Image (cartoon, helix red, strand yellow):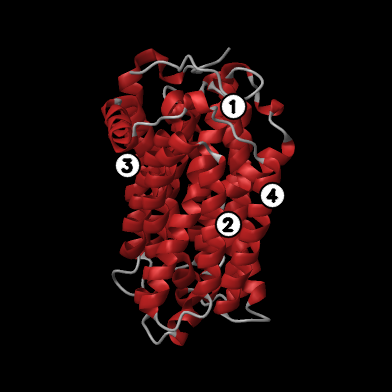
Amino acid sequence: MTGPSTHTASAPAPRSSVPAAALPLGMLCVLGALSAFGPLSTDMYLPGLPAMARGLHTSESTIQLTLSSCLVGLAVGQLLAGPLSDALGRRRPLLAGLLAFVLASAICAPAPSLGVLLALRFVQGMAGSAGIAIARAIVRDRTDGIAAARVYALLMVVTGLGPIFAPVAGGLLLHVTDWRGIFLALAAIGIAILAASALLVPETLAPAERHRGGLATTRAAFGTLARDRRYVANVFAGSFSAAALLAWVSGAPFVLEHIHHLSPQLFSFAFAANGAGIIVARQLASRYVGRVGPARVMLAGNVCQAAGTIGALGFTLTDPALGPLLVCIFISISSVGAIMPMAIALAMQDHPERAGSASGLLGFTQFTLGSAAAPLVGIAGTATALPLAITMCCGACASAASSLTLRRLSGSGAGSAPGAR
């Protein structure tokens, strides 16, 4: 396993000595907004998904491919943006990706057919992925250990606001526009984040630390990461957990609006409650990570997520009432707020010299599993929530298994606080 880099970042202080609180508030907010490109791209248009299916003259299960194509773009784009930022620095790829996101979102609005929209959603996802991958790399450039875990947890607050406000905003927009107007709103949001990034996010990777080896260097970096069993275990722990979340994102509109007959507005508020739960879980994770270490916090989140999805599966099989199902879903989705920041911090911990590549491979795995899970939830049509419950349960249990594998790899050090100073 590769040890910490001996290079000094362009930050005023070494990575390991910079606490979370030392990062400027404005920069933290922008990094959080960049990390939220996933929920912004996938959640804001969810209330209009059934209307989109009618407008494009396709089935409701087929229209879910617009979500899958965006997720594939988010996955592939991170695999490119991360290594590119290791070679060119963080700012240039970041700003270029944001500009491409704005253009792709604007062009999605007048899409004349499902095929055109699928292609544009893929491009939109690829462009937005630059913000996600590079934000994680910037945090690793500036922080280390427990400080990094706390920053990633702080970013989950802003990221958690995405599932709260994005579907609510989408539902409210449907009062004054149609689903096409939602994509114009995404373009406007992209413009605001582009401007904030240009003003508030400095270059964090000094020229001396950049990789100039091109494809060979990138391939070597990915090979090193793939051979690091601790990195792989952490990546899968976070990615399978995220797959359960993305399965819910994909299936929620049809489960809540069709099976349980909620209006788009009520769906938005029911869906947004889970975002609030993510923020609460993040607060708890940040509070206890310094005491018990990131791995134990993540495992506690795994236990809660697995219990919630098992309960959701049980209620889906035995009780058609909405209330118990929503409680179990709330527990499951909220747990992501504890699992994801710890998984990211642990995965990135030992690879500061290839932070962009580590972030890109992590994001690629996360969104690839998510894009695979999304269409599974509609495999039996929109009359039953059983495929959704099964998919979420499998994802949560696989994440827990990855965390347990990590503990076996690490022995008694699994619960330690790596990088604590």
What is the distance, in whole Å, between disc 4 and disc 3 at their CAs? 38 Å
Q: Which amino acid, by three-letter code, is at mark 2?
A: Pro
Determine whether 237 is above or below 1 in the image: below
- The disc placed on residue 163 is 2
Instruction: Answer with the quarter of the image where residue 143 lies.
Output: top right
* Of labels 3 and 2, the one closer to you: 2
What is the distance, in whole Å, between disc 3 and disc 1 at their CAs? 32 Å
Is mark 3 in CB contact (under 8 Å) with mark 1? no
Judging by the rendered image, the residue that carries numbered circle 1 is 142
Residue 261: image location, x then y, percent: 52, 77
- Residue 153 relative to residue 225: left or right: right
* Of labels 4 and 2, the one closer to you: 4
Residue 21: image location, x then y, percent: 70, 27
> Looking at the figure, which quarter contains the C terminus?
top right
Determine whether 389 is above or below 336 in the image: below
What is the distance, in whole Å, between disc 4 and disc 1 at their CAs? 19 Å
Looking at the rendered structure, the secondary structure element under dot 1 is helix
- Label 1 CA crowd tier, 10 Å (few <14, some 14–19, many 20+): many
- Residue 241 relative to residue 290: left or right: left
Residue 62: image location, x then y, percent: 34, 75
Determine whether 255 is above or below 218 in the image: below
Is mark 4 in CB contact (under 8 Å) with mark 2? no
Judging by the rendered image, the residue that carries numbered circle 3 is 398
Q: Which amino acid, by three-letter code, is at mark 4?
A: Ala
Can see residue 222?
Answer: yes
Judging by the rendered image, the residue that carries numbered circle 4 is 196
What is the distance, in whole Å, between disc 3 and disc 2 at their CAs? 23 Å
Earlier sequence position, callout 3 versus callout 1: 1
Instruction: Answer with the quarter of the image where residue 398 lies.
Output: top left
Please name whichever residue, 199 or 389, is drawn nearer the observer in this view of the structure: 199
